[in-house]
Amino acid sequence: MRVMPANEFSLYREMEYGTPEQNETVNRIIAEVRQDGDEALRRLSKQFDGVELGELRVSDEEIQAAYGRVDAEFIAALREAAANIRAFHEKQKRQSWMDLQPDGTITGQVIRPLRRVGLYVPGGKAAYPSSVLMNAIPAQVAGVPEIVMVTPPATAGSEGIDPHILVAAAEAGVRDIYRVGGAQAVAALAYGTAAIRAVDKIVGPGNIYVALAKRYVFGAVDIDSIAGPSEIAVLADDTADAAYVAADLLSQAEHDEMASAILVTPSPQLAERVREEVARQLETLPKRAIAAASIRDYGAILTVADLDEGVQVINRLAPEHLELMVAEPFGWLGKIENAGAIFLGPYSSEPVGDYFAGPNHVLPTNGTARFSSPLNVDDFIKKSSVISYSKEALMKNGRSIVTLAQHEGLEAHARAIQIRLTKEGDTRGGLEQ
Amino acid sequence: MRVMPANEFSLYREMEYGTPEQNETVNRIIAEVRQDGDEALRRLSKQFDGVELGELRVSDEEIQAAYGRVDAEFIAALREAAANIRAFHEKQKRQSWMDLQPDGTITGQVIRPLRRVGLYVPGGKAAYPSSVLMNAIPAQVAGVPEIVMVTPPATAGSEGIDPHILVAAAEAGVRDIYRVGGAQAVAALAYGTAAIRAVDKIVGPGNIYVALAKRYVFGAVDIDSIAGPSEIAVLADDTADAAYVAADLLSQAEHDEMASAILVTPSPQLAERVREEVARQLETLPKRAIAAASIRDYGAILTVADLDEGVQVINRLAPEHLELMVAEPFGWLGKIENAGAIFLGPYSSEPVGDYFAGPNHVLPTNGTARFSSPLNVDDFIKKSSVISYSKEALMKNGRSIVTLAQHEGLEAHARAIQIRLTKEGDTRGGLEQ
């Protein structure tokens, strides 16, 4: 793992949006689904997943049977995690409100859940039960009445879904599940087919084809952000345990060869010990090839003069995950401007947040923590403004409204007010003038 | 204005994203600004606005002088509107929060304003002081410390900015203003030049070139939604005043030949009276050519069996603006699922909200009220999750976290927990097992 001064490190990573061929494939798949509906879903599942689908919808019996195919320890841990995630997201809920004035003016903001949300869950090795919880529970807490899930069969040639995914869905309250994946599943959610009614928003991770399909359908429906490779940054001082720091860096590096793991520290001693620990711990990791590539290409130990400079580096990085392994972590929290999730102290290892503590693990990547947020209940609600003016309120304020409309050259706007002022007897701003 | 049963009306309007030539132009402009910076801004301003720019930044003297060039009535009305907008958006502000557990677990959500926001303001006839207030004030209320505005000169060949725009900006607290518009201004905000530092988010309306540029830079920075043509829907019964309904429909129709104005009513009598009133009021409108085209192509009076069916039509339309001109408007509010802003009763004419009442006039169009919201303070903040586990909390829950990580095949995640369990003396989930 390279060690270098922070100011020699380049933060910039250009995002990729697929090759022209991948874009072309996705455009074609979407067109097929819009034209042929479920028939296209079956045809494309045969082509890409090698499976002849029977019923698209997963039966209640299959969901129930999944419970018999996973171990009890998994179910118990999943339920604890789900309870924590639900409790955390319940605190994000907001109420509609109104402001009432003595002249009869009422203004307000109505908050309503989205009607119908589609959750994409990858199949195969990227099938993560924790992602099912993290995407479904905020929607459920928001009050979304219809949550539908799409996911491809677990293995090519069979139509069965990974039982861990089915159990996670059921625990999160999702039972409307369709065995279809890829860009075709996204198209079905966006535009609807006979089997799968169109949704208002699509969330959940996926491969490049899923990501391109989500970008394509955005506008017809809402989508969540399109996640880049995972990232961790650790800001640590002399008090940090090098073995903990190294283990946490590697926990992100194992995700993806493009994942980024960065230590920022004013301590040359810690820098050296972490470098050694990373090399040592890497040796025995099952995913050491992936993790080693990630550490080599996107990992770095950045040395800084002091923690204040370290904070500046962190704020420029705007990392997805940030660990503060410093003597007084809460003392530094107020200085952190940009980070998706912030883990404080030696026991708040990043996987605590990935799986269990309650905050969402769907987080802004690639510097977007500068302007975006963890997935949360607000992502599943919509607001409407409410305006009710009394006759008294309109009479009092009508003239000002007319003035502003006329200065913008919007005479029909002015007249909509004037016609009322005239008719209701106050001619000061009325049409007669 | 055509009158037809609601079920014969097609709601679907395909959005346009510019011609290939327009996209090509925007791509070229952005590349030029990224390469040549301020020099490109000057070159493009000469090419598109016909002006040789001196200082890009508008001086404090020019802003002060603008107050002498607008009338007192305008300033007074603008200040009343700004105060109402500020008061409404103050109610949207939220606090960071923390949840504290007896075992030492702390989870929370930190809310911070974006650091730097860019506001695009169109020049020429689409220069609306009200839009300056509606875009700048929510950012300011959110606590954004740096708000920068870009706007092209008011008339070709001169570098002066419309004084109404400058006064609106100053009243909203914005004094960092640059005399540049078009796709080049968006590029400068997104990537930065010597004169204009890069921002975190760009908001504000613009022509097709501005919209395409915003789409292009999205990802490097955040953007607001890209607005479609304006829309109004009125749900009215026999108690509605046909002249008011017609005036309000026309107030949106005058915006744009593609604007949409729709009345939904169970009353054939009202339908007929509104049809006549629209024709009559159209005659004397300064913008009657635009309004007539809008009413002809996108206007409709939709007849329904009763108000319940009317509400269903409204929810499918998901209009930008909705007026409830019915006997008991608040009784129907709970049934409205999809609408950007809802105006209740005969005195809540839509321009009341465009200019004055306080709620934002930047609203979701083209059916996107199904999943998106009026511009609001949340659009100018970002959230970070906070997780702090004590040793006790990690010892208690570590085993469950390990179980979940191992079921996902993420061994480095499991080990980041296990190394702590082992070292801290609890070997139940530790590496020794």
Image (tube, coloured by chain):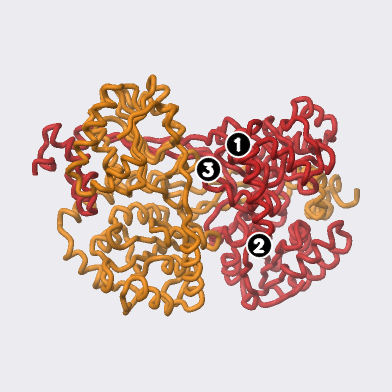
Chain colours: A red, B orange
In the image, residue B119 lies at what x, y percent? Answer: 39, 60
- Is residue A323 something that shows in the picture? no
Quarter assignment of residue A287: bottom right
**Label drawn at residue A378:** 3
Tell me the chain of label 1: A
In the image, residue B100 lies at what x, y percent? Answer: 60, 43
Quadrant, the N terminus of chain A: bottom right
Q: Amino acid at mark 2?
A: Ala
Tell me the chain of label 3: A
Q: Amino acid at mark 1?
A: Gly
In the image, residue B386 lies at what x, y percent? Answer: 61, 51
- Is residue A37 something that shows in the picture? yes
Tell us which disc is closer to us: 1 or 3.
Answer: 1
Q: Are marks 2 and 3 in contact (CB under 8 Å)?
A: no
Instruction: Give the distance between the C-alpha atoms of the residues marked 2 and 3, in whole angstroms.
Output: 34 Å
Of callouts 1 and 2, the N-terminal one: 1
